[in-house]
Image (spheres, rainbow, N blue to C red):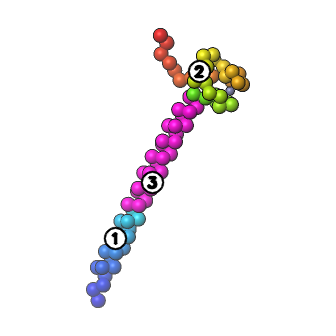
Amino acid sequence: MLTGAPQNAGIVAIALAYTITFTILSVGTSLIIGGLKVLRAGFYEQHCKSCLYDLTSVEGDTCPECNTPITRPAEVAS
Ligand SMILES: [Zn+2]
């Protein structure tokens, strides 16, 4: 019987389909997680770490809501 070749071809096709699907899912998940990390980092730079108070317009060194010291990213002194 010569049914070996078509069966192998089917297995290869299925394996290829699984590989492609897994690769796409892995890359997509990595991109989503990476994007969330970037968004979260940006959020915490502008909000108090303790109470999440919006610090975008706060000039002092402490949070006006809970007095937690504000740690800002290094800025160039002018
Ligand atoms: Zn606070």
Q: Is residue 71 placed above or below 10 in the rendered structure? A: above
Point out residue 11 in the picture as x, y percentages from the top left corner. 36, 73
Badge 1: residue crowd in 10 Å (few <14, some 14–19, many ≥20): few
> Which residue is found at the position 41% from the left and 65% from the top?
18
Q: Residue 22 vs residue 45: left or right? A: left
**Residue 39 in picture, x, y percent from top left:** 52, 37
- How far apart are the two marked residues, 3 and 1, measured between alpha carbons? 21 Å
Q: Nearer the viewer, mark 3 or mark 1?
A: 3
Q: Taking 78 as reference, is 7 left or right?
A: left
Question: Mark 3 Cα within 10 Å, few/some/many (few <14, many 20+)?
Answer: few
Asked if disc 2 and disc 3 are in contact, CB closer than 8 Å, the reply is no
Left or right of residue 51, residue 36 in this image: left
| Residue 30 located within the stretch drawn in magenta | yes
In the image, ligand 1 is in what quadrant? Answer: top right
Residue type at mark 3? Ser
- Mark 2, other Cα within 10 Å: few <14 / some 14–19 / many ≥20: few
Residue type at tag 2: Ser
Q: Which residue is mark 3?
A: 26
Separation (CA) of disc 1 from disc 2: 60 Å
